[in-house]
Amino acid sequence: MKDERLTSENPMALEAAEQSASVTMPLITIDRLRMETDGDGVTTLIASKGCPLSCRYCINKKILSDAIPCRSVTPQELLDMVKIDDLYFRATNGGVVFGGGESLLHARFIRAFADIAPKEWVIWAETSLNVPEELLREALPAVDRWIIDIKDMNPEIYRAYTGLSNERVKENLRILAAEGRDADVLVRVPLIPGYNTEEDCRRSIDELTSIGKWYRYDPFPYVIREEAPAGKGETK
Ligand code: SF4
Protein backbone atom coordinates (compact mmCIF):
# COMPACT_ATOMS: atom_id res chain seq x y z
CA MET A 1 0.00 0.00 0.00
CA LYS A 2 2.46 2.63 1.15
CA ASP A 3 5.37 1.44 -1.00
CA GLU A 4 3.30 1.79 -4.17
CA ARG A 5 2.96 5.49 -3.47
CA LEU A 6 6.68 6.09 -3.02
CA THR A 7 7.66 6.87 -6.57
CA SER A 8 9.27 9.94 -8.08
CA GLU A 9 5.92 10.51 -9.85
CA ASN A 10 4.33 11.01 -6.49
CA PRO A 11 6.28 13.85 -4.84
CA MET A 12 3.71 14.32 -2.08
CA ALA A 13 4.19 10.73 -0.97
CA LEU A 14 7.96 11.17 -1.02
CA GLU A 15 7.66 14.33 1.04
CA ALA A 16 5.44 12.51 3.52
CA ALA A 17 7.99 9.69 3.77
CA GLU A 18 10.83 12.16 4.43
CA GLN A 19 8.76 13.92 7.05
CA SER A 20 7.92 10.55 8.56
CA ALA A 21 11.58 9.65 8.93
CA SER A 22 12.57 12.90 10.63
CA VAL A 23 9.98 13.25 13.39
CA THR A 24 9.64 11.01 16.42
CA MET A 25 7.29 10.61 19.38
CA PRO A 26 8.00 9.30 22.90
CA LEU A 27 5.71 6.27 22.96
CA ILE A 28 4.66 4.91 26.34
CA THR A 29 2.24 2.18 25.34
CA ILE A 30 -0.21 0.91 22.76
CA ASP A 31 -3.60 -0.46 23.76
CA ARG A 32 -5.27 -2.48 20.98
CA LEU A 33 -8.82 -3.57 20.19
CA ARG A 34 -10.71 -1.02 22.25
CA MET A 35 -14.44 -1.09 21.51
CA GLU A 36 -16.44 2.13 21.58
CA THR A 37 -14.06 3.57 24.19
CA ASP A 38 -12.38 6.88 23.41
CA GLY A 39 -13.69 6.87 19.88
CA ASP A 40 -16.13 4.91 17.71
CA GLY A 41 -15.60 1.41 16.35
CA VAL A 42 -12.47 -0.59 17.10
CA THR A 43 -9.58 1.67 18.02
CA THR A 44 -5.99 1.49 19.14
CA LEU A 45 -4.92 3.96 21.80
CA ILE A 46 -1.44 5.43 21.45
CA ALA A 47 -0.17 6.85 24.77
CA SER A 48 2.64 9.36 24.50
CA LYS A 49 4.74 11.13 27.10
CA GLY A 50 4.44 14.72 28.24
CA CYS A 51 1.68 17.00 29.53
CA PRO A 52 1.66 20.66 30.55
CA LEU A 53 -1.03 20.17 33.20
CA SER A 54 -0.82 18.84 36.74
CA CYS A 55 -4.32 17.52 37.30
CA ARG A 56 -4.91 16.50 40.88
CA TYR A 57 -6.48 13.14 39.99
CA CYS A 58 -4.31 12.31 36.98
CA ILE A 59 -4.18 8.55 36.62
CA ASN A 60 -1.14 8.88 34.36
CA LYS A 61 1.18 10.65 36.80
CA LYS A 62 3.51 7.69 37.03
CA ILE A 63 3.79 7.08 33.32
CA LEU A 64 4.28 10.79 32.66
CA SER A 65 7.25 11.02 35.02
CA ASP A 66 10.79 11.00 33.67
CA ALA A 67 11.47 7.84 35.64
CA ILE A 68 9.38 5.76 33.26
CA PRO A 69 11.21 4.73 30.10
CA CYS A 70 9.54 5.31 26.78
CA ARG A 71 10.43 4.38 23.25
CA SER A 72 11.09 6.96 20.57
CA VAL A 73 9.28 5.93 17.38
CA THR A 74 8.91 7.35 13.88
CA PRO A 75 5.48 7.49 12.19
CA GLN A 76 6.45 4.55 9.97
CA GLU A 77 7.50 2.46 12.98
CA LEU A 78 4.20 3.24 14.70
CA LEU A 79 2.27 2.41 11.53
CA ASP A 80 4.03 -0.95 11.36
CA MET A 81 2.98 -1.64 14.98
CA VAL A 82 -0.69 -0.76 14.61
CA LYS A 83 -1.52 -1.94 11.09
CA ILE A 84 -2.18 -5.45 12.38
CA ASP A 85 -5.71 -4.18 13.15
CA ASP A 86 -6.27 -2.61 9.74
CA LEU A 87 -9.24 -4.87 8.92
CA TYR A 88 -10.97 -4.12 12.22
CA PHE A 89 -10.50 -0.39 11.71
CA ARG A 90 -11.94 -0.52 8.22
CA ALA A 91 -14.86 -2.80 9.16
CA THR A 92 -15.99 -0.68 12.12
CA ASN A 93 -15.09 2.84 11.01
CA GLY A 94 -12.49 2.75 13.75
CA GLY A 95 -8.90 3.86 13.80
CA VAL A 96 -6.17 5.26 15.96
CA VAL A 97 -6.58 7.45 19.06
CA PHE A 98 -3.64 9.63 20.03
CA GLY A 99 -3.75 10.11 23.80
CA GLY A 100 -1.28 11.04 26.46
CA GLY A 101 -0.27 12.81 28.33
CA GLU A 102 -1.12 15.57 25.91
CA SER A 103 -1.35 14.26 22.37
CA LEU A 104 -1.07 17.67 20.69
CA LEU A 105 2.47 18.15 22.02
CA HIS A 106 3.21 15.72 19.19
CA ALA A 107 1.11 17.46 16.54
CA ARG A 108 3.84 17.23 13.91
CA PHE A 109 4.15 13.51 14.49
CA ILE A 110 0.38 13.02 14.24
CA ARG A 111 0.37 14.88 10.95
CA ALA A 112 3.24 12.83 9.56
CA PHE A 113 1.51 9.64 10.71
CA ALA A 114 -1.80 10.64 9.09
CA ASP A 115 0.05 11.30 5.83
CA ILE A 116 1.18 7.67 5.58
CA ALA A 117 -1.73 5.87 7.28
CA PRO A 118 -4.60 4.40 5.21
CA LYS A 119 -7.14 7.13 4.55
CA GLU A 120 -9.96 4.83 5.73
CA TRP A 121 -8.66 4.95 9.29
CA VAL A 122 -10.23 7.55 11.56
CA ILE A 123 -7.58 9.56 13.43
CA TRP A 124 -8.68 10.73 16.89
CA ALA A 125 -6.89 13.09 19.28
CA GLU A 126 -7.60 13.10 23.00
CA THR A 127 -6.51 16.45 24.35
CA SER A 128 -6.98 19.07 27.05
CA LEU A 129 -6.47 21.65 24.27
CA ASN A 130 -4.17 23.57 26.64
CA VAL A 131 -1.44 23.94 24.03
CA PRO A 132 -0.14 26.79 21.86
CA GLU A 133 -2.38 27.60 18.90
CA GLU A 134 0.34 26.55 16.43
CA LEU A 135 0.15 22.96 17.65
CA LEU A 136 -3.61 22.86 17.19
CA ARG A 137 -3.30 24.30 13.69
CA GLU A 138 -0.59 21.79 12.81
CA ALA A 139 -2.84 18.90 13.87
CA LEU A 140 -6.07 20.26 12.34
CA PRO A 141 -5.70 18.70 8.85
CA ALA A 142 -4.63 15.34 10.28
CA VAL A 143 -7.19 14.76 13.03
CA ASP A 144 -10.68 13.57 12.02
CA ARG A 145 -12.29 13.52 15.47
CA TRP A 146 -11.47 15.19 18.77
CA ILE A 147 -12.08 14.23 22.39
CA ILE A 148 -11.53 17.32 24.51
CA ASP A 149 -11.51 17.20 28.30
CA ILE A 150 -12.16 20.80 29.26
CA LYS A 151 -12.06 20.04 33.04
CA ASP A 152 -14.19 23.12 33.89
CA MET A 153 -14.71 26.38 32.01
CA ASN A 154 -14.50 28.42 35.22
CA PRO A 155 -10.93 29.82 35.32
CA GLU A 156 -10.59 29.54 39.11
CA ILE A 157 -11.79 25.95 39.22
CA TYR A 158 -9.57 25.08 36.27
CA ARG A 159 -6.48 26.60 37.83
CA ALA A 160 -7.15 24.99 41.21
CA TYR A 161 -7.46 21.56 39.59
CA THR A 162 -4.75 21.73 36.90
CA GLY A 163 -2.35 24.44 38.08
CA LEU A 164 -2.75 26.46 34.85
CA SER A 165 -4.98 29.05 33.21
CA ASN A 166 -7.61 27.85 30.71
CA GLU A 167 -7.28 30.88 28.42
CA ARG A 168 -5.59 28.76 25.76
CA VAL A 169 -8.31 26.12 25.99
CA LYS A 170 -11.01 28.70 25.30
CA GLU A 171 -9.06 30.29 22.47
CA ASN A 172 -8.44 26.90 20.86
CA LEU A 173 -12.12 25.99 21.20
CA ARG A 174 -12.94 29.20 19.33
CA ILE A 175 -10.47 28.26 16.61
CA LEU A 176 -12.03 24.80 16.20
CA ALA A 177 -15.48 26.38 15.93
CA ALA A 178 -14.27 29.06 13.49
CA GLU A 179 -12.70 26.33 11.33
CA GLY A 180 -16.03 24.52 11.25
CA ARG A 181 -14.66 21.57 13.20
CA ASP A 182 -17.04 21.80 16.19
CA ALA A 183 -19.14 19.00 14.68
CA ASP A 184 -16.11 16.68 15.03
CA VAL A 185 -15.65 17.29 18.74
CA LEU A 186 -16.80 15.29 21.74
CA VAL A 187 -16.41 17.53 24.80
CA ARG A 188 -15.88 15.96 28.19
CA VAL A 189 -17.36 17.94 31.03
CA PRO A 190 -16.35 16.07 34.18
CA LEU A 191 -17.74 16.38 37.68
CA ILE A 192 -14.53 16.68 39.70
CA PRO A 193 -14.93 15.77 43.38
CA GLY A 194 -13.79 18.59 45.64
CA TYR A 195 -13.43 21.05 42.74
CA ASN A 196 -16.74 21.60 40.97
CA THR A 197 -20.44 20.84 41.24
CA GLU A 198 -23.15 19.72 38.85
CA GLU A 199 -24.18 23.36 38.64
CA ASP A 200 -20.61 24.26 37.56
CA CYS A 201 -20.82 21.56 34.87
CA ARG A 202 -24.08 23.02 33.60
CA ARG A 203 -22.45 26.46 33.47
CA SER A 204 -19.53 25.01 31.54
CA ILE A 205 -21.92 23.49 28.99
CA ASP A 206 -23.74 26.82 28.67
CA GLU A 207 -20.46 28.60 27.95
CA LEU A 208 -19.35 25.90 25.52
CA THR A 209 -22.67 26.11 23.67
CA SER A 210 -22.10 29.84 23.20
CA ILE A 211 -18.78 29.04 21.45
CA GLY A 212 -19.74 26.24 19.07
CA LYS A 213 -22.11 23.47 17.99
CA TRP A 214 -20.18 20.55 19.44
CA TYR A 215 -20.97 17.07 18.22
CA ARG A 216 -21.47 15.62 21.67
CA TYR A 217 -21.09 16.43 25.37
CA ASP A 218 -19.88 13.75 27.72
CA PRO A 219 -20.71 14.74 31.30
CA PHE A 220 -19.40 12.17 33.75
CA PRO A 221 -18.00 12.00 37.31
CA TYR A 222 -14.28 11.41 37.80
CA VAL A 223 -13.82 8.24 39.80
CA ILE A 224 -11.00 8.85 42.27
CA ARG A 225 -9.07 6.52 44.53
CA GLU A 226 -8.11 9.10 47.10
CA GLU A 227 -9.93 11.41 49.45
CA ALA A 228 -11.02 14.59 47.71
CA PRO A 229 -9.91 17.88 49.29
CA ALA A 230 -12.49 19.76 51.32
CA GLY A 231 -14.27 22.09 48.96
CA LYS A 232 -16.87 22.09 46.24
CA GLY A 233 -18.50 19.11 44.67
CA GLU A 234 -19.36 15.64 45.65
CA THR A 235 -16.90 13.07 46.87
CA LYS A 236 -17.21 9.55 45.56
S1 SF4 B 1 -4.38 16.46 31.17
FE1 SF4 B 1 -4.55 14.24 31.43
S2 SF4 B 1 -2.45 13.46 31.37
FE2 SF4 B 1 -2.31 15.68 31.70
S3 SF4 B 1 -2.15 15.91 33.93
FE3 SF4 B 1 -4.33 16.10 33.35
S4 SF4 B 1 -5.18 14.02 33.56
FE4 SF4 B 1 -2.92 13.83 33.51
Image (tube, grey):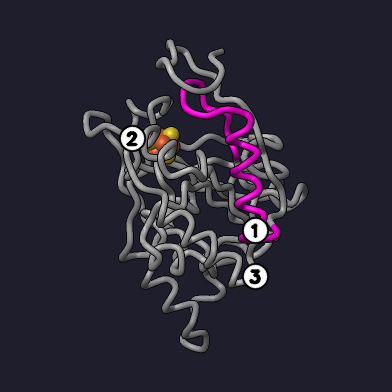
Q: Image quadrant for the N terminus?
A: bottom right
Q: From the viewer's perspective, tell me whether residue 1 is left or right of residue 134.
A: right
In the rendered structure, find residue 210 and report the number of the disc placed on it: 1
Q: Earlier in the sequence, mark 3 or mark 1?
A: 3
- Give the label, 1 or 2, closer to the camera: 1
Task: Give the residue number, with chain letter if any, for mark 2.
Answer: 54
Q: CA distance from mark 3 to mark 2?
A: 30 Å
> In the picture shown, does residue 21 fall above or below 192?
below
Q: Pick whichever, 24 or 164, lies toward us.
A: 164
SS assignment at label 1: helix
Q: From the viewer's perspective, tell me whether residue 102 is left or right of residue 66.
A: right
Q: From the viewer's perspective, tell me whether residue 153 is left or right of residue 75.
A: right
> In the picture shown, does residue 7 fall above or below 113?
below
Question: Looking at the picture, how far across and down is residue 104, in whole percent?
Answer: 42, 54
Q: Pick whichever, 54 or 104, lies toward us.
A: 54
- Give the label, 3 or 1, closer to the camera: 1
SS assignment at label 3: loop
Whether residue 203 is in magenta: the answer is yes
Question: Looking at the picture, how far across and down is residue 4, in whole percent?
Answer: 56, 73
Residue 33 in view in this figure: yes
| Magenta span | 189-213
The residue at 48%/43% (across/down) is 154
Name the kind of residue labelled 1 in the image.
Answer: Ser
Task: Give the residue number, with chain letter if any, for mark 3.
Answer: 180
SS assignment at label 2: loop
Name the kind of residue labelled 2 in the image.
Answer: Ser
Q: Earlier in the sequence, mark 1 or mark 2?
A: 2
The residue at 49%/82% (across/down) is 12
